[in-house]
Every structure is written in structure tokens, then in C-alpha cells.
Amino acid sequence: MFESFHLPRRGLMFILSSPSGAGKTTIARKLLAVEQNLDMSVSVTTRPIRPGEVEGRDYFFTERAGFDAMVKEEAFLEWAEVFGNCYGTPRAHIVEGLERGQDFLFDVDWQGAQQLSQRAREDVVSVFLLPPDMGELERRLRARATDDESVIAGRMARAGDEISHWDAYDYVVINHELEDCFDKVRTILHAERLKRSRQTGLIDFTRNLKT
Ligand code: 5GP
């Protein structure tokens, strides 16, 4: 079988954000299943673990004191408070992986996307997913049923606020239909991998072409 040729390149930080219920988790899982060079960036959080979640796969769960200590040690690339809980991206694993050409997928809110973009603009590709309409968003939140009524109401209230940050992202994709949305997000990833500035092997490659 034809094996695609790749020059050495720097990894990228692929950020997927959306209001809760717009399909972000489903798209993220599908991407991770088919993209070999893409790893999830697992965040640290102070929020309680939900049924079905696994420590170290979904999050690293910690008490507030442990989180605050990590903030103090500057162990996070970014962190933010969302719905009264703290979430942060551990720094060391990401910095080392990018150097090796490893790509990372980030499920962070707009605050995380903003901080990562400010600190590592060249490495960041940010995608914002929009629901087709707010009724659909609420239906998806209810169908999930892992949160109680007050949490759902809080998330609906925040969805409008979250959506207002759409224009800070590199790409915006409307999730009308899952497969179509997934294809678009994957196309963005593939194109961004080819960006000249990430292809660190180009200098040697072109030098050899000329000699
Ligand atoms: P959940 O509690 O539903 O897993 O996540 C709540 C929100 O926190 C989501 O919008 C998610 O994208 C965001 N989030 C998860 N991890 C991080 C992180 O490390 N940093 C930031 N800024 N947001 C995060």
C-alpha cells in the first residue's frame, strides 16, 4: 500500500471548543479513533468525577489545594474556572510532544483557547463548533442526562455567552450533521499539518534537492 510521505515537522495544538451539547465530545472521540498522530491533552480538574469517566483518560481529578499548588508551580499551559470548577492543561507533556511532532487535541473552553493562542500562536489551530439552533442544543444536553436540571439550566444560560466568542477562533463549523461536521474538522487538521511553518524538515529537504 502507498505510504504517505512526511517530512519531520512540529506538532500542533488542535483546539475544539463549543457550548456544551454541540457535539464536541463526539467529534473529538471520532478524531482520536482515526488519527494516529493525535493525542488527547488530558486536563486537571477540581470538578467531581462523573459516572463512566476514568481518571487519567478523561481528566486528572484533584482537590482545590492540589490544583492551586500546580498553578503556583506554573505547571499549567493555561487554566480557567468554568461553572465554578477549575480546569487546567498540564504543560510539560505538551511542550515535549510538540517538539517530537506529536499533535494534541484540546477540549477547552474559550478562555483556554484564548490563553493558548496568546502563548503559542504558531502552534495553535482553533475550531469552534456551533449547534444548528438552540433547541437542538437543549435536546442534546437533555439526552445526555448525566447532569441534573440545575446544571443543564446553567449550561444553557452559559451557551449564549460561550457562542459570543466564535470570532476568536481560526475556524467555525456548524454541526448540522455529524459526519459532515466531522469531515470538515478532519480536513482542517490535515491541511494545517501541511502548513509550511510546521514543516521543520523543509530546509534540509530543499537543500538536498538543489545539490
Ligand atoms: P466538563 O466539566 O463538561 O468536562 O467541561 C466543562 C468545560 O470545561 C468545557 O467547556 C470544557 O471544554 C472546559 N475545559 C475542560 N478542560 C479544560 C482545560 O484544561 N482548560 C480550560 N480552559 N477549559 C477546559
Image (spheres, helix red, strand yellow):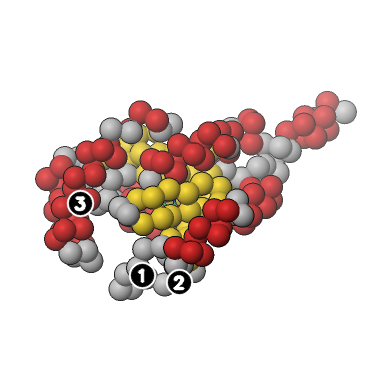
Q: How many marks?
A: 3
Task: Indicate the secondary structure of the residue bearing disc 2.
Answer: loop
Cβ–Cβ under 8 Å for marks 1 and 2: yes
Cβ–Cβ under 8 Å for marks 3 and 2: no
**Residue 183 pos. (x, y %):** 37, 44
Identify the residue under disc 3.
154
Relative horizontal placement of residue 150, taking residue 163 as reference (left or right): left
Q: Nearer the viewer, residue 31 or 124?
A: 124
Identify the residue under disc 1.
49
Q: Nearer the viewer, residue 206 or 67?
A: 67
Query: What's under tag 1, amino acid-wise?
Result: Ile
Cβ of mark 1 under 8 Å from ligand 1: the answer is no
Asked if residue 2 shows in the view, the reply is no
| Residue at x 77%, y 34% (from the top left corner) | 205
Q: Nearer the viewer, residue 143 or 80?
A: 80
Task: Indicate the secondary structure of the residue bearing disc 1.
Answer: loop
Within 10 angstroms of label 2, few (less than 14), some, or many (20 or more) residues?
Answer: few
Real-space Cα separation, disc 1 to disc 2, in angstroms: 8 Å
Task: Indicate the secondary structure of the residue bearing disc 3.
Answer: helix
Identify the residue under disc 2.
55
**Residue 67 pos. (x, y %):** 49, 60
- Report which quarter residue 86 is drawn in: bottom left
Q: Earlier in the sequence, mark 3 or mark 2?
A: 2
Asked if residue 88 shows in the view, the reply is yes
Relative horizontal placement of residue 206, taking residue 175 as reference (left or right): right
| Residue at x 57%, y 37% (from the top left corner) | 119
Query: Extreme top residue here?
Result: 210
Within 10 angstroms of label 1, few (less than 14), some, or many (20 or more) residues?
Answer: some
**Residue 98 pos. (x, y %):** 64, 48
Q: Quadrant of the N terminus?
A: bottom right
